[in-house]
Image (cartoon, rainbow, N blue to C red):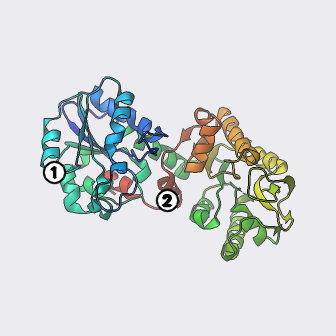
Amino acid sequence: MHSFQTFSFQNKKALVRVDFNVPLNDQFVITDDNRMAATIPTIKKILADGGSVILMSHLGRPKDGPEEKFSLKHLVPHLKELLGNVPVLFAEDCIGTKTTEMAAALKPGEVLLLENLRFYKEEEKGDRAFAEKLSKYGDVYVNDAFGTAHRAHASTAVIADFFTAENKLFGALMEAEVISAEKVLHRADKPFTAIIGGAKVSDKILIIENLLERATDIIIGGGMAYTFIKARGGKIGNSLCEDDRLDTAKEVLEKARLKGVSIHLPETSIIADKFAADANTNDCPSDQIPDGWMGLDIGAKAIGIFTEVILKSKTILWNGPMGVFEMEKFQNGTKSIALAVAESTSHGAFSLVGGGDSVAAVNKFHLADKVSYVSTGGGALLEYFEGKELPGIAAVKGV
């Protein structure tokens, strides 16, 4: 498989799968362009080489064919802005005679954006005939959509079958994502600390179990921590808890003990008498939360212990917040962990931040440039760290 940076796209039409699934407001204005901005280096490199670019993406979850609110035409003005002085054309369909003619007429230095792939059910079904139609547009297939790499869709996996090994490759973004993820999962310097947060144990149990084989330390925060605390016999008041996962939590704690992996649960919590920004709060031991109160953030002692672990680490994976950081009253834990990860990175640790909420947190606290890598793939990164093979990666690698 070719390296993207050394591949020459001169006089080639590059069919590039991007993840332009960006949020739009009621006026169809993009409210967060991170996914678009992240793939601009890939597009610019192809154009600079003297190639042309045909972009394909999905947007939202259209149910029955074309819907105005999910049309990629709304992205064209901003795409032009991001690319500068580059001609950007738009095909009102992703397949069909007119689109085929537009792709054929595309000149070096030009960009053609195809309409939403999910306007056809064949895309999500991984339909081979649909994938083959798309493949005819390009000489080279470039997958730069890590965020959809866990989907075996027509444009993310099946389409690669119609290109020879030397004519399919990862884009700059996808290449960086894969290199960073593989470094953490397979070549991590020890101590390796995984920081896992979020609401539910059920959402993260597979990633925790896979990391028990690799990490030296696992920090658990967020709502899911209280299932573990209750499993150890703690009193958690009205805190979030999955009672049907108590046995699973006990098993994880025992496996970690046998493998010599240190699991760090928050010793203290910021508790509240209601789930609201104006709630009364207190800092108390996480296993002694009174009835009627709930843990909504990690407490001062927990922050101190977690920070100490993070600062000793050489590799850090962070997936999930420590509390309800969207509310200012409960953001201190997540912010403190973000600062600790940034500080550890400045001392030479390699840090990978992934998952929507963790990424939102480092962006909110202006620390994205203070960590080693911020992943664009939420679900894809999660599945990768669960140990699953991602179809979008396997298809290009020819696995």
From the top left corner, tell me how far across and down residue 386 is, in percent.
53, 61
Is residue 208 toward the left or the right of residue 233 in the image?
Answer: left
Give the secondary structure at mark 1.
Answer: loop
* Residue 293: image tag: none
Dividing the picture into quarters, in which one does residue 288 lie? bottom right
Tag 1: residue type? Answer: Gly
Residue at the image position 20 percent from the left and 50 percent from the top: 135
From the top left corner, tell me how far across and down residue 283 is, in percent.
86, 53
Closest to the observer, 84 or 393: 84
Tag 2: residue type? Answer: Glu
Few, some or many residues within 10 Å of mark 2 (<14, 14–19, 20+): some
From the top left corner, tell me how far across and down residue 78 is, in percent.
38, 33
Residue at the image position 47 percent from the left and 55 percent from the top: 380
Residue 58 visible in this rendered orientation of the protein: no
For the C terminus, the quadrant is bottom left
From the top left corner, tell me how far across and down residue 256 is, in percent.
69, 65
Residue at the image position 32 percent from the left and 51 percent from the top: 396
Q: Closer to the camera: disc 1 or disc 2?
A: 1
Name the residue furthest front: 27
Dividing the picture into quarters, in which one does residue 131 lie? bottom left
Dividing the picture into quarters, in which one does residue 53 lie? top left
Few, some or many residues within 10 Å of mark 1 (<14, 14–19, 20+): few
Q: Which residue is mark 2?
A: 383
48 up-or-down from 37: above or below: above
Residue at the image position 43 percent from the left and 41 percent from the top: 27
Closest to the observer, 74 or 219: 74
For the N terminus, the quadrant is top left
38 up-or-down from 318: above or below: above
Is residue 322 toward the left or the right of residue 86 in the image?
Answer: right
Q: Which residue is mark 1?
A: 96
- Alpha carbon separation for disc pair 1 and 2: 34 Å
